[in-house]
């Protein structure tokens, strides 16, 4: 899975956390991105005040977003006393270990979907419309007397060996990636 795809999945995760908590998903994604970038650079964490300055959102909004991230276990904090002001500050960062665990779970879900698809391709014969490219299993084609339900053209048997080959490659690559990730996640 490419970094871009992973970022997209993370964004969707943040979006769904925001939506289920009635928080503006755009603002939640923005805060998440800032904290993630900071965490990836190995920083100590960002305070709600810094986030307020970086985003321009109200402090109450920022705190609410941090709270729901914390409840969803995708964010963590370090507490420390401000040296001069004698007040306690929270430094928020993405918990990269639990994040890696989340990513691993997501990759496994993708893998199981791919395997289902592969099995479907193995176990079925396919027929295709030469005109519009629509695709049918044998029983679907049989029920339609091998005529396309959209345009009436005669359906043609499709050789899906290339699709199977490609799916097999993707499955293998993802399996290797998951193995690598598992070594990383469980060795730390
Ligand atoms: Zn057709």
Image: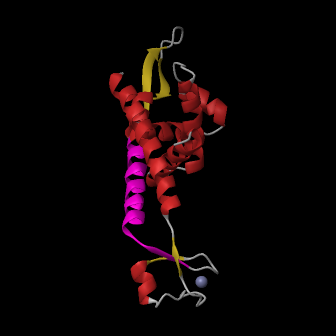
Q: Residue at 57%, 80% (x, y): give it.
A: 129
70 to the left or right of 166: left
Q: Is residue 158 above or below residue 71?
A: below
Q: Position of residue 135 (x, y in %)?
A: 52, 75
Quadrant where the C terminus sits is top left
Residue 68 pos. (x, y %): 43, 42
**Would residue 62 be found to the left or right of residue 21 on screen?**
right
Could you tell me residue 173's position as x and y percent?
47, 42
Give the residue displayed 64% in from the left and 81% down from the top. Answer: 131
- Left or right, residue 47 beside residue 106: right
Is residue 5 toward the left or the right of residue 144 in the image? right
Q: Percent position (x, y) of residue 83?
A: 51, 8
Residue 8 colored in magenta in the image? no
- Total labels: the figure holds 0
Farthest residue toward the top?
83
Dominant secondary structure of the residues highlighted in magenta in the image: helix
Q: Quadrant of ligand 1?
A: bottom right
Q: Against 50, is 57 above or below?
A: below
Is residue 95 in view? no
Where residue 139 sits, quadrant-wise, is bottom left
Extent of the magenta region: 105-128
């Amino acid at each position: 899975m490419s970094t871009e795809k992973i970022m997209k999945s993370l964004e969707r995760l943040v979006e769904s956390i925001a939506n289920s908590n009635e928080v503006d998903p755009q603002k939640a994604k923005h805060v998440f991105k800032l904290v993630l970038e900071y965490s990836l650079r190995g920083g100590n964490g960002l305070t709600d005040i810094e986030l307020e300055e970086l985003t321009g959102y109200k402090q109450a909004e920022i705190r609410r977003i941090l709270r729901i991230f914390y409840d969803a276990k995708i964010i963590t904090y370090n507490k420390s006393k401000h040296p001069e002001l004698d007040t306690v500050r929270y430094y928020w960062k993405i918990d990269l270990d639990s994040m890696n665990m989340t990513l691993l779970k997501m990759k496994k879900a993708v893998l199981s979907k791919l395997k289902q698809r592969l099995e479907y391709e193995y176990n079925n014969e396919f027929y295709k419309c030469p005109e519009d490219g629509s695709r049918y299993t044998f029983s679907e084609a049989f029920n339609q007397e091998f005529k396309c339900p959209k345009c009436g053209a005669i359906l043609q048997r499709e050789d899906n060996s290339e699709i199977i080959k490609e799916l097999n490659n993707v499955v293998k690559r993802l399996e290797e990636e998951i193995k690598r990730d598992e070594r990383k996640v469980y060795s730390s």
